[in-house]
Image (cartoon, rainbow, N blue to C red):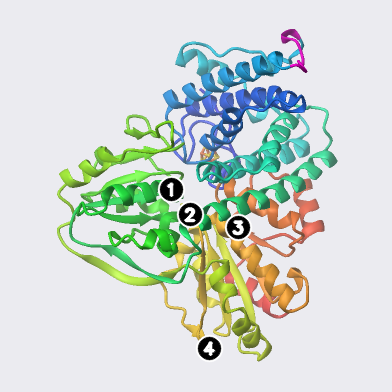
Amino acid sequence: MEMFCRQCEQTAMGKGCTKMGVCGKTAETAALQDLLVYALKGLAVVGKQARENGVRDELADHFLMAGLFATVTNVDFDNARLAALIQEAVAKRERVKSLLQASSTAGKQAEQWPEIAQWNPAGSLEALIGQGAEHGILKDYSAHEDVRSLQELFLYGLKGMAAYADHAWILGEKNEEVTAFFYKGLTALTDTALSADAWVGLVMEQGMVNLKCMEMLDAGHTRHYGHPVPTAVALGVKKGPAIVVSGHDLLDLEMLLQQTDGSGVNIYTHGEMLPAHGYPQLKKYKHLAGHFGTAWQNQQKEFDGVPAAFLFTTNCIQKPQGSYVDRVFTTGMVAWPGVPHIVADRSGKKDFTAVIKKAQALGGLAQDAMRKQIVVGFARQAVLGVADKVVAAVKAGQLKHFFLVGGCDGAKPGRNYYTEFAQNVPQDCAILTLACGKFRFNDQDFGDIGGIPRLLDCGQCNDAYSAIVIASELAKAFNCGVNDLPLSLVLSWYEQKAVCILITLLALGIRNIRIGPSLPAFITPNILKVLVEKFNIMPISTPEADLKAILKK
Ligand code: SF4
């Protein structure tokens, strides 16, 4: 069976995965994900019409976000769960139709709905895969490659935003502008008549809506857990039973910390969970014992033979290896076939007893193995708390330039650029970092400039919001625009959350961004030309050449 997917940076040959995903996604899974996106577009078409007639359905609102999140790279590899999501999307579509028809301002009659809002999913998994094979990037989108390029940029950005909106929703944060945009955006993707100019406008609009979405998630995190404070985190493990929590979902981590309090089981963060240590309401748990492992893409090697339970709350999961698959659990939208999945009850509570029992049954780690400590928690409040020192250091010529070196990490070669870049940043410059790309260099000692650490870790990828606030506030302090600050953005991208952040930065008018390790396969030469002309976006070259070019300005 053939597939076609090029939504992430590691796509095969830099062109597209056609037989099997480099991420491990099979052609069957790809077909089901394509069908799920098609089903969500049908739900959006009906939901948009319903909303225009004053009919809203919060269950459908959240499902649009969660469903799109399931199709993000390294999230859901479980065909049975994807099939259930497709059936649910269609059931929700029909429910919204009946709500609309029952309302006093009844909308279209059934026969007026387009095919995308009328089709029915097959009953068997095999037949659903067959239906999915009829959909996807090469079938449902424009035949004009530049228009399709913009449609893909938009769709992948929407998927990334859906992940953030889903996290925020679970934390009780909702924003009507963000919710409505999922309906608008998915419906737009069914409109074959939209021009390239119209798509450019929609992409820029998405960038600003995603800023609201990241702000909403920031509010969810800080309201629940307080503003991050600089915190030393032990890299490594302590003797005793252990659960390693991967992904981005702080609410899952909090519930697990509560359920293990006093149990003797230590909890470790992994990957993008690292910033959790900086939040006052999470760091108060003494058994949040440290951070396990390095970058997410090393998980197969680093989990091998470790007597700990592993809980994946969001991307990025890789195929669990035989030596540890019996101790892996998933929750939220992440899933792997055959791996136990923890579901929330109707109130959102999750029972992690199975994970805890597994950690206890494994007996735990035989001895302490701590490497060193690093400091996290330099989100917007912590950095802006020393803004006067920063401004004074810049004015005194002690601090010459800031580099935002961040973004998401991947397994492909070529990513050493970011390590070397960070290492080569001159001593009178500081590095702001966020997301998982930092695991290439965040355990190195960068020292400080007059008490200001040279490496400031702002947090997860969604904490790009913090970095944007920091840059805006510094621009105000220097009475200039963000593009006039001594600040350069050197970003790495991997999956769709990085796409929506990049779109937001462009929508904010931020120029001169360097991006790597390679440009997206879905960006055509003509669209790249537009991005270069409008934003002077450029691919990374070598650390030495890029640093030289930036600092000579
Ligand atoms: S998500 Fe990335 S690696 Fe996986 S199939 Fe798609 S392009 Fe390939």
Q: Secondary structure at mark 3?
A: strand
- Looking at marks 3 and 4 on the same chain, the residue that comes earlier in the sequence is marked by 4
Q: CA distance from mark 2 to mark 3?
A: 34 Å
Check whether the beta carbons of the residues at disc 3 and disc 4 lie within 8 A of each other.
no
**Residue annotated with mark 4:** 450
Q: Dots 2 and 1: beta carbons under 8 Å?
A: yes
Along the horizontal axis of the image, is 232 left or right of 324?
Answer: right
* Distance in Å between CA atoms under marks 2 and 1: 9 Å
Residue receiving disc 2: 224
**Of all residues shown, which one is farthest toward the top?**
111
In primary-sequence order, the first of circles 3 and 1 is: 1
- Local packing at callout 2 (Cα closer than 10 Å; few below 14, some 14-19, many 20+) is some
**Residue placed at 71% from the left, 42% from the top?**
177
The three-letter code of the residue at mark 1 reads: Leu
Q: Nearer the viewer, mark 1 or mark 4?
A: 1
Given residues 378 and 260, the one toward you in this image is: 260
What x and y, as percent, mark residue 173? Answer: 57, 45
The secondary structure that dominates the magenta segment is loop
Q: Which mark is residue 516?
A: 3
Residue 213 showing in the rendered view: yes
Question: What's the magenta region?
Answer: 104-111
- Amino acid type, mark 4: Gly
Q: Position of residue 227 (x, y in %)?
A: 51, 64
Up-down: is 157 above or below 238? above
User: Image quadrant of residue 273?
Assistant: bottom left
